[in-house]
Amino acid sequence: MMMKQNLDLIEGPKTRLSMHPKKFALWLFIGSVVMMFAAFTSAFIVRRAEGNWMDFEIPDIFWLNTGIVLLSSGTMHWAFTAAKRDDLETIKLALGITIILGFAFLTGQYISWGHLVDANVFFVGNPAGSFLYVLTGLHGFHIVTGITFLVVVLLNSIRYNVHAKNLVQIEMCTTYWHFLSGLWLYLFIFLLLNH
Amino acid sequence: MEAIDIKSREGEIHHGDYEQMEHHHESFLTKYIFSTDHKTISKQFLISGIFWALIGGSLSIVFRLQLGFPDLNLQWLQPVLGGWITETGKLDTEFYLAMVTMHGTIMVFFVLTAGLSGTFSNFLIPLQIGARDMASGFLNMLSYWFFFASSVVMLTSLFIETGPASGGWVIYPPLSALPQAMSGSGLGMTLWLVSMALFIISSLLGSINYITTVINLRTEGLSMTRVPLTIWAFFLTAVIGVLAFPVLFSAALLLIFDRSFGTSFFLSEIYIAGEALPNVGGSAILFQHLFWFLGHPEVYIVLLPALGITSEIIATNSRKPIFGYRAMIGSLLGITILSFVVWAHHMFITGMSPFLGTIFMFLTLIIAVPSAVKVFNYLTTLWKGNIIFTPAMLFSIGLVSFFISGGITGIYLGNTAIDIQLHDTYFIVAHFHIVMGSASFFGMVAGIYHWFPKMFGRMMDAKLGYIHFWVSFVGVYMVFFPMHYIGMAGFPRRYYSFTNFDAFSGFTDMNMMISTAAIITFGAQLLFVFNFFYSIFKGRKATANPWGSNTLEWTAPIKPGHGNWPGKIPLVYRWPYDYSKPGAKEDFIPQNVPFSQTPESNLPHEKDPEETPGDEGAIVLDEAKE
Ligand code: HEM
Ligand SMILES: [Cu+2]
């Protein structure tokens, strides 16, 4: 027994990571997006520690937007489980709702910028405000890419190309969308703690 | 003929792929231009890299002329440089800075990142791990074309009227953030940022592809503890790239906002021409942190592939197993991790907290340990080997030499107290040109000599190779070694001229010598370029395995087609360094030879697995495994 195990260690056919290469590549991409936001948020902290920092209020509407984006994660997951169950109608419905929620989130973020301007927090001015706009803006940009991805999956599902035997795409989309919600949650908590 | 062969041997749907590739009529456009074949893409990167190296090199010759012969009349350069040569035949002072900046940018990013990783990761990863191609040929193609677009933008910036970016390759604000700071900070800087944004996208696409391919597409039997060290090096380089480049992207984005939208991330309380700018509250140091968080890992992005290539070439041409294979992997991993925690050693004298400086000094000095492990292992691999001095081998040994002499000066620089004196002097220039510039460049050239037969099916001329090596090797030391002295004497880097300062006028002869050596060294590179292009068409025909090497690429046809192996993908039974194994018939045993065929040389624990590996392994790609 011992001997056999040893042999396996030296010779046995080695299994490679059993993850689909595309999914794996998506995780790497997510990793690089994480690094980008890590850079921004650490720059935020470093800069804040240097003083001359304007304190600002977090717009209340962020709470609502956070709710929306979390809800959209829920509907995204609903779409995914529907795909696993081969429930083709539900996939379309759930994806559609997710897309609408995505747009709702973007609109909410846009309104929040209006509130910020009303509160005299500008993009051009004290870096505190600039950072706020960059963080939300860049996250918003990624939401746009996420919505694009969702639309692609929706179109595919309308063509009956998304089902239990063809899950890769919707799974990747789910991963990405959850990541974007998580990213927002991180940014929101970060801003709550550091504003 | 070949195709029928494949069918009878494999007859599997999965391999339909390969046939299709072979029979599909490729137009010139899809074969040579918008190719998704990793071998073609790698050659595209290589040729682009050589093109950039010539441009970057020529720039350095021009500014070396200025430094070595300040009184020289450069009128004859007017046809090329136009208005940058003044009426009196002098180099325009701001253009001097532009050239230094472009030289650095081009060499670090376009030659030693894209040209090196792009060429060898692309070429060797699929061939050495037994894959048909990269995980995504399409993204791979995109990676090249983003690089191409980035190159076009950067090249254009060289020819615009206000000149290219001039604030140094590190583009520190405020110089880079204020278009009115100097002429290169206008459109030139904008183009620099656009070009680098494209470059970063290209690099991320490439890196994600390399990592995915190495993780997912290795052939049966090829565990991560059996892959050649080249693969480990390319893999970790890509990991560093994925983690570090996004941070540069962040920094560039904030810089763009500062430049074009009036934000103050990096700008604060600045007077220009007596007028106060509106920007308050920014921090230029912040930019340095962000930049060097990429910048330091970047130097290892440049170096690691060269180290991997060297491991392979030294083992092959010493006819000995690499010494300390696992220690080599460990030190690569160590360097990868440590490279992310030493960035502030570039900022010791920015006014950073001295306590923080001490921490970074400590971390910086630790990185010398894995570096020393690598050097030790190269030397012990060479020790008592049956060394075959091919040009590739000579260049690899040259790399080891540079890695030692340049690494040692790194240890000086890592000490905060000494760095106060040496920072931003020619000592730095000497340090990084030896340890990064020359070492990586030698690694790249070694790789070209070594894998040329696989790339083009012909050999490069060895005699020209020897001349190229000796002139380059001696030349590099002649150019960069004296710079240590100049640096210790306090010469600041990036100065247009020293003759204006009494304190620095003493080294005129030394500077003349350096410049002369630089010109000769550059000349030797032209010899190499000639050898390269001549051999592509007229070189001696290569044999299948000209260096007697163990790795999988040499089991492929001399000129591998689309899909790399016409038949089945070879399986791997052993590590790649079975050179001069006691008892063996020959002094090398390729990785795809089962132990059952080499009873005479097997060590007690070396037996084939009970069931021979099935076909499954090679085709994981096609199945969406859940
Ligand atoms: C033994 C390991 C090393 C140590 C301790 C070390 C240390 C340092 C330090 C402290 C500096 C900053 C000096 C200053 O600006 O005042 C520096 C600069 C530099 N090092 Fe190293 N280094 C090491 C190896 C390397 C390697 C392996 C590379 C590249 C492959 C490299 C590339 C560079 C470059 C490019 C710069 C200058 C960047 C610039 O200011 O333009 N170093 N090194
Ligand atoms: Cu460094």
Image: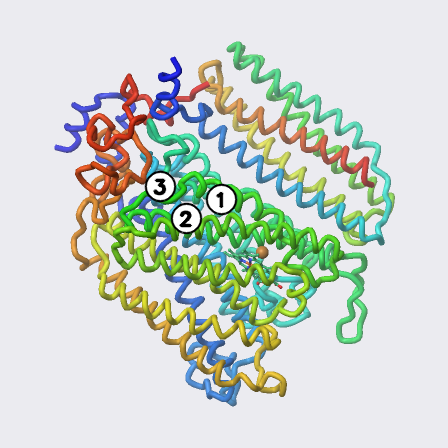
**Amino acid at circle 2:** Asn
Q: Chain of mark 2?
A: B
Q: Nearer the viewer, mark 1 or mark 2?
A: 2
Residue lying at the far left of the rendered structure = B1
* Residue at the (26%, 34%) spot, across then down: B21
Q: Secondary structure at mark 3?
A: loop
Query: Against B460, is B514 above or below?
Result: below
Query: Against B501, is B363 above or below?
Result: above
- Compared across the picture, whether B35 is left or right of B514 comes to left
- Compared across the picture, whether B143 is left or right of A98 comes to left
CB within 8 Å, label 1 to label 2: yes
For the residues labelled 3 and 2, the Cα–Cα distance comes to 37 Å
The N terminus of chain B is located in which quarter? top left
Q: Quadrant of residue B519?
A: bottom left
Q: Position of residue A153 (x, y in %)?
A: 53, 25
For label 1, the residue is: B331
Q: Quadrant of ligand 1?
A: bottom right
For the residues labelled 3 and 1, the Cα–Cα distance comes to 34 Å
**Amino acid at circle 1:** Ser
Q: Specify whether residue B416 is in view.
A: yes
Which residue is at the front of the view, A29 or A155?
Answer: A29
For label 3, the residue is: B36
Q: Quadrant of residue B161?
A: bottom right
Q: Position of residue B110 (x, y in %)?
A: 46, 57
Answer few, some or many: residues within 10 Å of disc 3's Cα (few below 14, many 20 plus, some between 14 and 19). many
